[in-house]
Image (cartoon, rainbow, N blue to C red):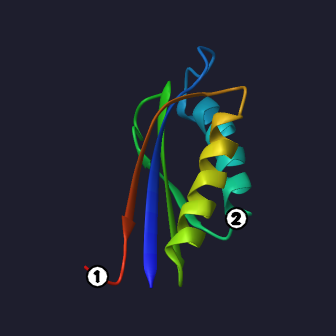
Amino acid sequence: MFTGTAEFDLLLPGDSRSLKDKRGYVRPIIAALRKFDVSVAEVDSLDLHARAGIGVAVVAAESAHVRDVLDRCERLVAARPEVELLSVRRRLHGDDE
């Protein structure tokens, strides 16, 4: 069994001046990521209007599948024109740990 996680640090547009505005940007991204059958949630910068941290976790029998799913998630987030992807932190855990 292999598990993988990714945390995306996002910069939101300047018109995100309230937590309600922030939700308008974060919710569609989370909904799109769920289509990859991953667990996903907003995990960081919860009280900041212009930043968001979104975490993704996936479990699979093969490490290649975990990497593939995380790659697809990263491409999806990076392709969103309304946000800027500042950084991605990824981890892979396998049977040998």
Q: Is residue 95 above or below residue 9?
A: below
Assess disc 2: are there few (<14), some (14-19) or many (≥20) residues with their C-alpha within 10 Å of its C-alpha.
some
> In this rendering, which labeled residue sits more in front, label 1 or label 2?
1
> Dot 2: what SS?
loop
Percent across and percent down for residue 74 are 60, 46
Q: Residue extending furthest left? A: 97
* Amino acid type at image mark 2: Phe
Percent across and percent down for residue 11 are 52, 26
Per the model, the C-alpha gap separating discs 1 and 2 is 26 Å
Q: Is residue 79 above or below residue 89?
A: above
> Dot 1: what SS?
loop
Determine which of the numbered discs, if any, sits on residue 38 in the image. Answer: none
Which residue carries the number 1 mark?
96
Quadrant holding the N terminus:
bottom left
User: What residue do we see at 71% from left, 33% from top?
Assistant: 80
Q: Nearer the viewer, residue 95 or 44?
A: 95
* Amino acid type at image mark 1: Asp
Percent across and percent down for residue 30 are 64, 52
Of labels 1 and 2, earlier in sequence is 2
User: What residue do we see at 59% from left, 14% from top?
Assistant: 14
Q: Quadrant of residue 34?
A: bottom right
Quadrant holding the C terminus:
bottom left
Taking 21 as reference, is 43 left or right?
left
Which residue carries the number 2 mark?
36
Q: Is residue 20 above or below residue 44?
A: above
Taking 28 as reference, is 13 left or right?
left
Q: Nearer the viewer, residue 13 or 66?
A: 66
Percent across and percent down for residue 8 are 48, 43
